[in-house]
Image (spheres, rainbow, N blue to C red):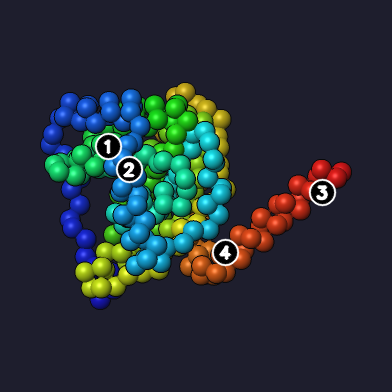
Amino acid sequence: MSDLAPMRAQVYSDPRPKEHFDRFHERSRTREPDWAYELTRLLTSLYAFTLLRARSISAEKVPGRGAAILAPNHFSFMDHFLTAGFIRRKVRFMAKSQLFKRPLQFIYTHGGVFPVRRGARDEETFITAETILAKQSVVVMYCEGGRSRSGRVSDSAKPGIGRLALRTGAPVVPVAIYGSSHIRNWKRLRFPKITVQYGDAIQWERVENPSREQQQAVADQILAEIKRLYDGLQEHGRSGARRLAAEQRRARAQGVERAIAA
């Protein structure tokens, strides 16, 4: 018997027409997140830092300015907030369109979230994401698409993140979130310890019209790096992964010093 609480059945299509979501995209393209973002960040951070004992490793690897794409694995509804909770920059999320219903759609729209219509080729989502990145902001996008129901990182990536990385040329920061698959057990009064580790940014030259194969190759590379970080957390634990990250920072610093001296 699985130790994970069951998830609701997936809904893979939204019957509402594209035009229903135009106003949400328009707001995301033209306005920044407001007080709703800060309030949600405060509440979710309190939950994460206390009950979930969430801590980060190498959050400094997220660029302090300029466009960036954060690419975490996806187990829980909290993954957006865990990814953003350890950096100072405001982060924009794409979320399935089924969530855009009253009363929560007010929080989503004012908090900088924009919809993706599952089951449809949603070009508006990419236009919104590219517009946000053109303004030198940060977007979260999942390689795996929807949440993993098995509690394991998926073996396959969706090509969408490859498309966004190639069309914009924005650096992609892989992120491993360890422990969040058990957040759904909160009704059983079980609260896992969460670790969020940020990897080195990866950047590709811009390609205006990348092929499907190019998109998939980039997405696969990003997912492989997420899995490498995740496997490291699984093998070494939080303290071990933190120690290894510190050793890598020292090694890089020494390499830079030797290069300058030479």
- For marks 1 and 2, give the CA distance: 7 Å
- Labels 1 and 2: the sequence-earlier one: 2
Q: Please, what is the three-letter code of the amino acid marked with disc 3?
A: Arg
Residue at (46, 58) in percent of width and height: 196
Q: Please, what is the three-letter code of the amino acid marked with disc 1?
A: His
Q: Which residue is mark 4?
A: 242
- Labels 4 and 1: the sequence-earlier one: 1
Identify which residue, 161 or 96, lies in the foreground: 96
Quarter containing the N terminus: bottom left
Label 2: how many Cα within 10 Å (few below 14, some 14–19, many 20+): many
On screen, residue 100 above or below 86: above
Q: Is residue 182 visible?
A: yes
* Mark 4, secondary structure of its residue: helix
Q: Is residue 152 visible?
A: no
- Labels 4 and 2: the sequence-earlier one: 2
- For marks 4 and 3, give the CA distance: 25 Å
- For marks 3 and 1, give the CA distance: 48 Å
Q: Which residue is mark 3?
A: 258
Label 4: how many Cα within 10 Å (few below 14, some 14–19, many 20+): some
Residue at (56, 49) in percent of width and height: 60
Which of the two discs, 4 and 2, sits closer to the camera?
2
* Mark 2, secondary structure of its residue: helix
Estimate the x, y position of residue 13 in percent, counting from the top left: 18, 41
Q: Which residue is mark 2?
A: 37
Q: Are marks 3 and 1 in contact (CB under 8 Å)?
A: no
